[in-house]
Amino acid sequence: MATPPSTSAARKKHSEAIAEAVHALYTARMAGAVDEFVSYFAPDARLTVVGNPALSPGAGMRLGREDIARYLQHLHDQNAYLSHRIEDIVTEGDHVVVRWTAEVRFLDNGRSGTYEILDHIRVKDGLIVELTHFYDTGGIAIARGRVKIA
């Protein structure tokens, strides 16, 4: 059964608004625009970086805008973000999944690479209340020299 045009149009408009906000969020993240980035989060939001702290010292949970802001600033103190591309945005209710890539140069050793990333975002009242960040911790650990390969 086809969706009524008004419902279809509303869904399309909602998807377009989500996509616009996602692109603005990731542009702010990559630019190190900390205040703009955290403005998308609820005051008590939670950002979780999934990974083993031995491979990824940044793994763990940040609570609230201030903690999230410190984390983003720390990332920009250690890395140069050269480019990014949003590959997919999938929405379902208050959940948004973003698959994206980032080209990063590590300032401590000059190495760079392009990494695939997946973020799961939960939104409430127009603000992010949870963001869970998944990325290639092994690839980055190798590039950073934390893991030696034969």
Image (cartoon, rainbow, N blue to C red):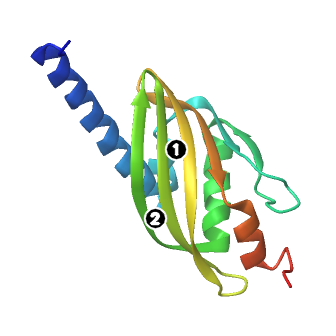
Disc 1 and disc 2: Cα gap in Å? 13 Å
At 57% from the left edge and 30% from the top edge, which residue is drawn?
43
Residue 38 image label: 1
Give SS at disc 1.
helix
Give SS at disc 2.
helix
Amino acid at circle 1: Val
At 65% from the left edge and 87% from the top edge, which residue is drawn?
110
Residue 101 locus on image (x, y percent): 49, 62
Any part of residue 32 in sight? no
Residue 83 image label: none
**Which of the image's four quarters has the C terminus?**
bottom right
Q: Residue furthest left?
A: 5
Amino acid at circle 2: Ala
Residue 45 locus on image (x, y percent): 61, 32
First in sequence, mark 1 or 2: give its number.
Answer: 2
**Mark 1 neighbour class, 10 Å CA radius: few under 14, some 14 to 19, many 20 or more:** many
Residue 120 locus on image (x, y percent): 56, 38
- Identify which residue, 51 or 48, lies in the foreground: 51
**Mark 2 neighbour class, 10 Å CA radius: few under 14, some 14 to 19, many 20 or more:** some
Residue 31 image label: 2
| Left or right of 34 on screen, residue 60 | right
Res 140 quadrant in image: bottom right
Res 3 quadrant in image: top left
At 52% from the left edge and 54% from the top edge, which residue is drawn?
34
Task: Tell me if residue 132 comes above or below residue 36 in the rendering.
Answer: above
Residue 61 locus on image (x, y percent): 75, 41
Any part of residue 54 in sight? yes
Residue contact at pointers 1 and 2, CB within 8 angstroms: no
Task: Tell me if residue 99 comes above or below residue 109 in the rendering.
Answer: above
Task: Tell me if residue 142 comes above or below residue 118 in the rendering.
Answer: below
Q: Residue furthest front?
A: 1
